[in-house]
Image (cartoon, rainbow, N blue to C red):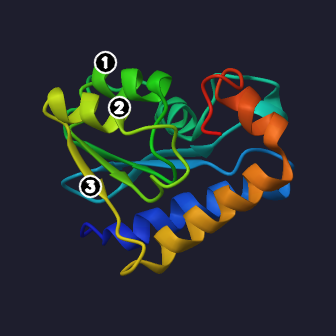
Amino acid sequence: MAYNSHEFYMERAFNLAAKSYSQGGCPIGGVLVDNDSGQVLGEGHNALVQEGNPIIHGEMAALRNAGRMSNRHNTTMYTTLQPCFMCTGAIAQFGIPRVVVADIANAASGETIQFLRSRGVEVIIMDPAASSVARKCIELTARFRDEKPEQWDEDWGGASNARS
């Protein structure tokens, strides 16, 4: 199996985010991919509403779905929204060497990207001017933030942590 484009995997992550949104949840999706084969190892979406679980963000759901692995040192995490500190910590903890992000416009700050890069993680931010899926991720998250600001704040750990 050949490795597909970033657009391909992010479209998959977006579809998971849209599924969460359609269920009343936060629209954040994650996909973990093997860098050599292009195989999807795990995927998922935010499950704050669906499971009542505040720590199952898109990236965490993808890691959980991937299950046990001896290591994740040859993988890429695709995420529809810039990772929060919790997910950033998991990415660093498991040694994931590359993260592709569709939406930084709705994130609280650039601190998590700076942290990942300081740890040697390659962070690729998709350009919404060139990527239709990046634009869709940004638009869906912005719509959710407008529709459910209290849930957005809850997902980020409280209003003081979420972008105003």
In primary-sequence order, the first of circles 3 and 2 is 2
Residue 54 image offset from top left, x and y in percent: 70, 23
Query: Which picture quadrant has residue 124?
Result: bottom left
For the residues carrying marks 3 and 2, which lies nearer the camera in this image? 2
Query: Badge 3, how many Cα within 10 Å: few under 14, some, many 20+?
Result: some
Question: What separation in Å lies between label 3 and label 2 (alpha carbons)?
Answer: 15 Å
The type of residue carrying mark 3 is Ile
**Which residue was labeled with disc 1?**
93
In primary-sequence order, the first of circles 1 and 3 is 1
Q: Label 1, secondary structure: give it.
A: helix
Residues at circles 1 and 2 in contact by the CB criterion of under 8 Å: no
Q: Residue 124: which disc? A: 3
Q: Is residue 123 left or right of residue 163?
A: left
Query: Badge 1, how many Cα within 10 Å: few under 14, some, many 20+?
Result: few
Q: Nearer the viewer, residue 7 or 116?
A: 116
Taking the spot 20% from the left edge, 40% from the top edge, the residue there is 74
